[in-house]
């Protein structure tokens, strides 16, 4: 497991990478919500009204930071997060 703090403006987010059997589980965790790789179940995240963003085709934290939003929960969309948006822009919202 890898844990990193990534500076976003004056605050930090937690970046977590967990090596699983075939793929890596990646989470970028802010105080208002999180960004997660394809393992994210948006139906469940919506049920709990979480600000959650799904990214795909990433296997490292570096790739995750360069990704774009694949999909998002209703709560995330309410904050202005949308499909195709840069993850760096999303981090400014969820930090």
Image (cartoon, rainbow, N blue to C red):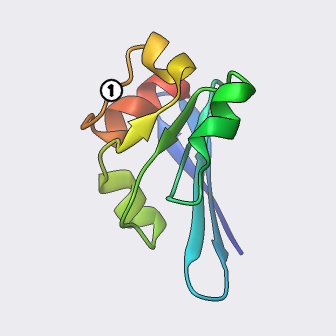
- Asked if residue 31 can be seen in this view, the reply is no
Q: Secondary structure at mark 1?
A: loop
> Would residue 40 be found to the left or right of residue 9 on screen?
right
> Would residue 2 be found to the left or right of residue 70 on screen?
right
> Would residue 66 be found to the left or right of residue 39 on screen?
left
Instruction: From the top left corner, tell me how far across and down residue 35 is, in percent.
Output: 53, 44
Instruction: From the top left corner, tell me how far across and down residue 16 is, in percent.
Output: 64, 60
- Residue that appears at 30% across and 33% down: 83
The furthest residue to the front: 43
**Could you say which quadrant of the image residue 18 lies in?**
bottom right
Instruction: From the top left corner, tell me how far across and down residue 89 is, in percent.
Output: 33, 31
In this figure, which residue is indicated by the disc labeled 1? 82
Instruction: From the top left corner, tell me how far across and down residue 90 is, in percent.
Output: 40, 31
Circle 1 crowding by C-alpha within 10 Å: few under 14, some 14–19, many from 20: some
- Asked if residue 85 can be seen in this view, the reply is yes
- Residue that appears at 54% across and 26% down: 94
Q: Quick check: 47 above or below 54?
A: above
- Residue that appears at 50% across and 22% down: 76
- Residue that appears at 66% across and 88% down: 21
Q: Quick check: 15 above or below 75?
A: below
> Would residue 8 be found to the left or right of residue 52 on screen?
left
**Could you say which quadrant of the image residue 2 lies in?**
bottom right
């Amino acid at each position: 497991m890898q844990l990193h703090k990534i500076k976003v403006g004056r605050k930090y987010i937690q970046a977590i990478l967990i090596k699983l059997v075939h793929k890596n589980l990646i989470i970028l965790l802010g105080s208002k919500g999180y960004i997660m790789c394809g393992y994210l179940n948006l139906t469940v995240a919506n049920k709990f009204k979480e600000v959650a963003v799904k990214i795909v085709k990433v296997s490292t934290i570096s790739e995750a930071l360069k990704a774009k939003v694949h999909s998002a929960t209703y709560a995330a969309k309410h904050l202005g997060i949308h499909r195709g948006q840069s993850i760096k822009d999303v981090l400014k919202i969820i930090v």
